[in-house]
Image (cartoon, grey):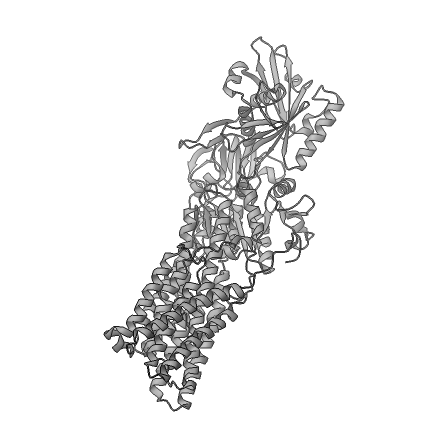
């Protein structure tokens, strides 16, 4: 009893004719090949071959290690992503009670076939799709499959939504018989499985880096040819110039980029884990930082996934019930003051009758946690919680007024009545039901004015997204009166507004996303009025904005799907269409959800975010990110981490490409200043190894910029070097080259070891630029960078003063005065880097257009 749809999904198993077939898995060699054909990886492979050709085996080993790690991580990510489809094959109940040949037997649910007669009762999981042949108060929780927050009554010979039971749904009340009509791939779950076949595409960062890799590949080839041609024109020997051209081309490739990206993503994943977000696909860390649209499910995602009696109305006034979960703790507020049963007799009478006319129960969680759970109809459980928060004791009520009769709920009457014996021998009839069946003269003895007031109030609550129940009662002298009189001559006690309440963190999370320039949209299978009310309460859309429905989408009258912010009564296929429409409009879409019906959209979105605790296994397996605490605020933290990753990738590219530009300019311009070969191949590779190694990787660990969540996301079509990064690269590259060539020319004219001077100044100035690239200068936010720069600077100096390295690199020792000049120039690199960041900051993206506008 009390099994939720999410708990049911975790218990479901696989095998047999009722299993949903999984798609074939790609062989390992094909996965590896797909990773290696990435343009940047191809450039690194060529760079590795060239470094081997130059005899620099240590640098080649570093490049090959980066390629190996990147390929291994990519293969692991693909394997994990495919588990989303495999999870759907687990969507059958562990056992089912089946009637075959007139005998009842228990079978593994995977062995249920069309034509079987299955018996279901409270707490059971429906094993397959089927028609309801008979039902006694049968109520099923379909929230994980349809998004409908309220349980659905099942009865034979009714419309398809009520006359058919679907696989994976949970019986929360009553019992019945179901004739199985569809299993496996032919069931509702099977149709959802067919929507999950498409693998997720590349992330925005992967697309941007792929474009960057293509540019680098072309530039490297052109650079090799240019340097070689210029050397031969000047009459340099062919062999040394080939080696120099290859070395410079290798130096121009930021081979540490995959390592920087991997480190930044890994650190982001670790920080997200500290904030209860589990990253299943590493590139997803950055993808959230690029998101422009967050499409979110309602039930269990933005809301608590349970029913709560929140609004109370009696002829004497209204009140609000406060509290979370099914825990009885909470309070009832009227006119800003907390009230109890003694303070508000009208509210006490309303909730006393609602607790008596009730078959649900509440119990603490079996694991001893603070969470309580509902047994039976969640709507009735919500009434018990409201009564407890007013101070009523359900057990004491049952002892004082034991039940002696009842008229059960049915879909025709839409109400339920129970009869209770009073201590004096008289009886109390308590009735609850839909307002349209209860607020009638045939049922109530109240005057027309009160009935009109109550009807208007019920309509207002319904417009606000509440499911409304009316409650009435009457005293009778004896329980032996005809049962037909129990539902006539009643007195209206009041109305109860019930809904699935938003999580406490949902509204501030939506507000934070909007401040960050992200457009939130709501996609749910629930009623349009409920969807509108939740969207308005959370700030997703205003009351005046349009709500489109799945029916309008089927009829083709919904218009442009990206023109609205709220979608109601949607199917899994339509959720997929909405996500595709936003992606087709050029947006980077995140989808959040927890149900089976969210699985296809979670998989197809640029990034899927699933609830970890309440979410179904299908949702968790389809997602790239799982929120272990089900807290929407964690999404905001994840977006911040994603923006940190992207900012650090751009920070590294600015630093690395500026250094590479400086090395190219030095090699191209030096000969025209009287320095035939400014740097030897070994010296170029040494500088590149030191500057792109530890300091470059350390830049990937820089903290998040302070204003990261106060600006819009980067446009999806923007290059990784866009927003003014190219001019900054050329500016810093030109500055480093001028400082280096100036120092080399001065050393050349004064008879000093000019080549060693160029070698030392070029490396040291680049390291100064690294320090100037920090996100928070003057702090100890990233001590790893300080250590890395100090170590690299020491090794750079060792290349001039350590005899073993001097022989390897072909350098000569410099005087202490020359060393001081090199250090001073490196300090200038830091100063200029900070100055240009202030004077020429990168262009900020424009804010997102208002809701309903074109994107």
Asked if one can make out residue 598 in the rendered structure from this viewpoint, the answer is yes
Q: Residue furthest front?
A: 817
Q: Residue furthest right?
A: 448
User: Which x, y percent locates residue 297?
Assistant: 56, 46
Image position of 553 with respect to 321: above or below: below
Image position of 26 with respect to 385: above or below: below
Displayed quadrant of residue 344: top right
User: Which x, y percent locates residue 561?
Assistant: 64, 54
Q: Which is more toward the observer, 201 or 727?
A: 727
User: Which x, y percent locates residue 291?
Assistant: 54, 55
User: Which x, y percent locates residue 146?
Assistant: 56, 43
Q: Which is more toward the observer, 771 or 554?
A: 771
Q: Which is more toward the observer, 821 or 446?
A: 821
Image position of 375 with respect to 836: above or below: above
Q: Which is more toward the observer, 282 or 772?
A: 772
Q: Residue furthest top?
A: 424
Left/right placement of residue 636 relative to residue 428 reads left
Image quarter where the C terminus lies is bottom right
Q: How many marks?
A: 0
Asked if one can make out residue 680 in the rendered structure from this viewpoint, the answer is no
């Amino acid at each position: 009893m009390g099994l939720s749809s999410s708990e049911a999904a975790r218990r479901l198993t696989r095998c047999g004719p009722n299993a949903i077939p999984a798609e074939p898995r790609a062989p390992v060699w094909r996965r590896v090949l797909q990773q290696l054909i990435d343009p940047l990886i191809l450039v690194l492979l060529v760079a590795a071959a060239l470094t081997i050709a130059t005899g620099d085996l240590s640098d080649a080993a570093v490049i090959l290690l980066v390629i190996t790690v990147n390929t291994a991580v990519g293969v692991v990510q693909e394997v994990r992503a495919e588990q989303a489809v495999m999870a759907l094959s687990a969507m059958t109940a562990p056992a089912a009670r089946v009637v075959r040949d007139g005998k009842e037997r228990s079978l593994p649910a995977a062995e249920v076939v069309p034509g079987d007669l299955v018996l279901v009762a409270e707490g059971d999981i429906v094993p397959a799709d089927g028609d309801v042949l008979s039902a006694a108060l049968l109520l099923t929780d379909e929230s994980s499959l349809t998004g409908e927050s309220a349980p659905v009554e099942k009865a034979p010979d009714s419309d398809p939504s009520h006359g058919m039971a679907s696989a994976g749904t949970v019986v929360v009340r009553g019992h019945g018989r179901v004739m199985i009509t569809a299993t496996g791939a032919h069931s509702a779950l099977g149709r959802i499985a067919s929507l999950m076949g498409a693998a997720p595409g590349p992330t925005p960062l992967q697309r941007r880096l792929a474009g960057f890799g293509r540019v680098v590949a072309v530039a490297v080839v052109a650079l090799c040819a240019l340097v070689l041609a210029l050397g031969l024109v000047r009459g340099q020997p062919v062999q040394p110039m080939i080696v120099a051209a290859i070395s410079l081309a290798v130096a121009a490739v930021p081979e540490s980029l995959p390592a920087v990206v991997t480190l930044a993503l890994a650190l982001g994943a670790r920080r997200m884990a500290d904030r209860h977000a589990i990253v299943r696909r590493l590139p997803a860390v950055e993808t959230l930082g690029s998101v422009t649209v967050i499409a979110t499910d309602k039930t269990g995602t933005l809301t608590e996934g349970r029913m709560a009696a929140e609004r109370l109305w009696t002829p004497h006034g209204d009140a609000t019930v406060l509290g979370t979960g099914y825990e009885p703790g909470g309070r009832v507020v009227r006119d800003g003051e907390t009230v109890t049963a003694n303070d508000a007799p009208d509210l006490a009478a309303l909730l006393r009758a609602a607790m008596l006319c009730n078959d649900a129960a509440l119990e603490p969680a079996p694991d001893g946690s603070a969470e309580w759970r509902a047994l039976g109809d969640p709507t009735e459980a919500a009434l018990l919680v409201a009564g407890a928060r007013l101070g009523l004791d359900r057990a004491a009520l049952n002892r004082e007024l034991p039940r002696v009769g009842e008229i059960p709920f049915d879909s025709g009457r839409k109400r339920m009545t129970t009869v209770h014996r009073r201590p004096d021998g008289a009886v109390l009839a308590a009735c609850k039901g839909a307002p349209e069946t209860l607020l009638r003269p045939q049922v109530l003895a109240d005057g027309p004015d009160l009935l009109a007031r109550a009807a208007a109030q019920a309509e207002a609550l319904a417009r606000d997204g509440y499911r409304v129940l009316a409650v009435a009662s009457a005293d009778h002298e004896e329980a032996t009166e005809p049962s037909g009189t129990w539902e006539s001559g009643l007195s209206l006690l009041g109305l109860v507004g019930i809904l699935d309440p938003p999580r406490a963190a949902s509204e501030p999370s939506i507000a934070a996303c909007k401040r960050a320039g992200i457009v939130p949209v709501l996609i749910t299978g629930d009623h349009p009025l409920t969807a509108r009310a939740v969207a308005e309460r959370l700030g997703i859309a205003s009351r005046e904005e349009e709500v489109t429905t799945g029916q309008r989408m089927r009829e083709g009258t919904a218009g442009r799907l990206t023109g609205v912010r709220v979608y109601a009564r949607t199917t899994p296929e339509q959720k997929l269409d909405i996500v595709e429409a936003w992606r087709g409009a050029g947006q980077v879409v995140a989808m959040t959800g927890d149900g089976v019906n969210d699985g296809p959209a979670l998989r197809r979105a640029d990034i899927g975010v699933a609830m970890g605790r309440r979410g179904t296994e299908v949702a968790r397996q389809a997602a790239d990110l799982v929120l272990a605490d089900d807290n929407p605020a964690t999404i905001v933290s994840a977006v911040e981490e994603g923006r940190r990753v992207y900012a650090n990738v751009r920070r590294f590219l600015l630093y690395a490409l500026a250094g590479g530009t400086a090395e190219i300019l030095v090699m191209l311009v030096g000969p025209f200043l009287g320095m035939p070969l400014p740097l030897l191949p070994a010296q170029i590779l040494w500088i590149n190894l030191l500057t792109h190694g530890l300091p470059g990787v350390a830049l990937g660990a820089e903290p998040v910029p302070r204003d990261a969540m106060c600006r819009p996301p980067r446009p999806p079509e923007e290059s990784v070097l866009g927003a003014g990064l190219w001019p900054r690269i050329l500016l810093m590259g030109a500055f480093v080259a001028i400082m280096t060539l100036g120092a080399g020319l001065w050393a050349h004219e004064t008879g000093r070891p000019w080549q060693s001077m160029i070698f030392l100044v070029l490396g040291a100035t680049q390291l100064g630029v690294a320090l100037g690239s920090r996100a928070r200068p003057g702090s100890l936010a990233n001590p790893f960078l300080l250590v890395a720069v100090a170590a690299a600077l020491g090794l750079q100096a060792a290349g001039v003063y350590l005899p073993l390295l001097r022989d390897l690199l072909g350098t000569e020792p410099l005087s202490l005065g020359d060393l001081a000049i090199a250090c001073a120039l490196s300090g200038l690199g830091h100063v200029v880097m900070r100055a240009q960041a202030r004077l020429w900051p990168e262009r900020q993206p424009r804010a997102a257009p208002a809701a309903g506008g074109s994107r």
